[in-house]
Image (cartoon, rainbow, N blue to C red):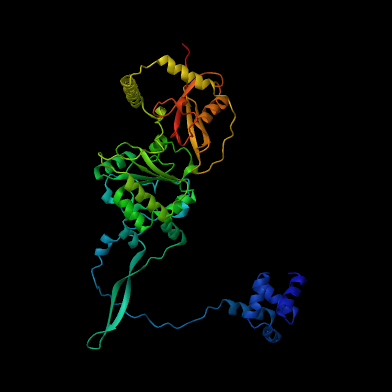
């Protein structure tokens, strides 16, 4: 040890000799904080008097003995244990699973963000049996408590002391991670564990709407949705009564059909909630990105239920945001053939009906005149450069443009300010090969959009839509 360490020790402790300071520093193995603690714990300068009569070795030995000597305490022998059963305990394992019992352990928040774990809601298996849900309200309550034996001593009617044990319900000790997992727990008690097609079948059988929620565990707003909205008892009651509720993780296989068919192509729109018609599959209402408050959500649902009905004889109001067209590239060869036949029959029927209506009004269809009018409107469209607006939920929208050669272009537009003409101008300036050729743009109904040039994207019903871009072949 250095003299500097000795001086430091003496300055802090007011030790009265170098030798005493050195003894304590040696005992602590050179650790200054330990040496100072030992000094004050063992009488400090009082050891100096002992050092005057004992040798250095004896002093060190005394200090070590005093440091490591374990205090001896007297204990009386334990009372003889007595066990008496108040009620049969074998009934509890059958009615209470708890963490580690019949139910699976709670998934902690750390596990939820672990990329090595399988995707999906707790990697659950899809089941068609709605009654096998392990997460009812009563069972969620039970998971927070446990039964423990507790000794009870009391006087009976004769004044004799009676001792017995009984089972007492007490809060189950939980770690911080378990508490967070419970707080942000998905709403298993009202969730149907089926895929999208199974949800449609169940909703038809029970005459309910489909309420779907797409989430991602790495987006806090999705976790807040579980904590604030789905846990509310009024929301639970409303959803259970009128909807078949399903919740999927964005990266899971169960969510894939919805993402492809309804055009949810980015996590930027999460959390996403939508109401689907179980008969037609049409998306009739949606919430994206922002978590609605409990009051607003309940008001929106009640308004929807007042305006829309699953009764086949009723007429529902038109939906402002039509379902995007199905991407044929995601279908099997047999499904693509079936889709092509349906479109062909539908187009022929629509064309025939339109011609009959015009003839009944005393007018004839002149194909060449209609084509000339479309060509005139198209030629008036000039290539104009438009900058892509920043993402603004509720204001901007993404539109997918598919070309005949298999290319796809996804671009953001201002749904309120940009018109259909803007889409044409963007195609002419940004998509290679379409700057100086005649082309058509059609929506999922195969309607030519050239007649809607001056309508806004929102008014034309093109929000979140998929458009087909085709070159017009010259005769």
Q: Residue 80, image x and y in percent?
A: 32, 79
Q: Residue 55, image x and y in percent?
A: 69, 82
Residue at the limit of the structure toward the front, as seen here = 362
Please say if 178 is above or below 53.
above
Q: Quadrant of the N terminus?
A: bottom right
Res 120 quadrant in image? top left
Residue at the limit of the structure toward the bottom, as seen here = 159
Please say if 379 is above or below 413.
above
Res 230 quadrant in image? bottom left
Please name whichever residue, 305 or 175, is drawn nearer the observer in this view of the structure: 305
Q: Residue 31, image x and y in percent?
A: 67, 69
Please name whichever residue, 185 or 96, is drawn nearer the observer in this view of the structure: 185
Please say if 385 is above or below 9.
above
Q: Residue 448, image x and y in percent?
A: 43, 25
Q: Look at the image and tell me whether residue 27 can be seen.
A: no
Please name whichever residue, 213 or 274, is drawn nearer the observer in this view of the structure: 274
Residue at the limit of the structure toward the right, as seen here = 3
């Amino acid at each position: 040890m250095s003299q500097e360490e000795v001086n430091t020790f003496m300055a802090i402790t007011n030790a009265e000799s170098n030798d005493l300071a050195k003894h304590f520093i040696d005992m602590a193995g050179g650790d200054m904080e330990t040496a100072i603690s030992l000094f004050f714990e063992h009488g400090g300068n009082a050891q100096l008097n002992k050092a005057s009569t004992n040798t250095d070795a004896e002093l060190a030995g005394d200090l070590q003995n005093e440091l490591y000597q374990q205090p001896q305490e007297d204990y009386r022998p334990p009372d003889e244990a007595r066990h008496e059963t108040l009620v049969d305990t074998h009934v509890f394992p059958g009615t209470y699973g708890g963490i580690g019992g019949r139910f699976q352990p709670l998934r902690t928040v750390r596990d939820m963000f672990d990329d090595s774990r399988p995707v999906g809601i707790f990697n659950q298996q899809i089941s068609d049996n709605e009654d096998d849900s392990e997460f009812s309200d009563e069972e969620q309550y039970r998971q927070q408590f446990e039964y423990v034996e507790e000794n009870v001593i009391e006087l009976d009617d004769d004044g004799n002391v009676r001792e017995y044990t009984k089972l007492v319900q007490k809060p189950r000790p939980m770690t911080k991670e378990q508490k967070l997992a419970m707080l942000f727990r998905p709403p298993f008690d009202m969730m149907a564990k089926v895929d999208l097609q199974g949800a449609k079948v169940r909703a038809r059988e029970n005459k309910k709407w489909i309420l779907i929620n797409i989430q991602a565990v790495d987006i806090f707003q999705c976790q807040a949705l579980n904590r604030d909205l789905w846990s509310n008892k009024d929301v639970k009651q409303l959803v259970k009564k009128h909807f078949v509720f399903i919740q999927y993780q964005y990266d899971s296989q169960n969510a894939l059909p919805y993402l492809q068919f309804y055009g949810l192509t980015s996590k930027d729109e999460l959390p996403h909630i939508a109401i689907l018609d179980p008969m037609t599959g049409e998306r009739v209402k949606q919430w994206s990105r922002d978590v609605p408050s409990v009051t607003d959500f309940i008001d929106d649902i009640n308004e929807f239920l007042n305006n829309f009905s699953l009764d086949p004889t009723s007429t529902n109001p038109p939906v402002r945001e039509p379902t995007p067209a199905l991407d044929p590239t995601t279908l099997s060869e047999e499904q693509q053939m079936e889709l092509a036949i349906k479109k062909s029959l539908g187009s022929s029927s629509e064309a025939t009906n339109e011609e009959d209506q015009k003839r009944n009004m005393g007018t004839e269809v002149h194909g060449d005149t209609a084509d000339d009018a479309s060509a005139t409107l198209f030629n008036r469209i000039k290539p104009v450069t438009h900058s892509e607006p920043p993402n603004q939920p509720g204001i901007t929208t993404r539109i997918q443009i598919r070309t005949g050669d298999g290319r796809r272009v996804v671009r953001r537009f201002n749904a309120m300010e940009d018109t259909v003409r803007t889409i044409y101008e963007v195609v002419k300036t940004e998509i290679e090969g379409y700057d100086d050729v005649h082309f058509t743009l059609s929506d999922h109904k195969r309607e030519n959009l050239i007649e809607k040039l001056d309508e806004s994207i929102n008014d034309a019903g093109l929000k979140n839509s998929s458009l087909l871009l085709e070159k017009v072949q010259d005769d």
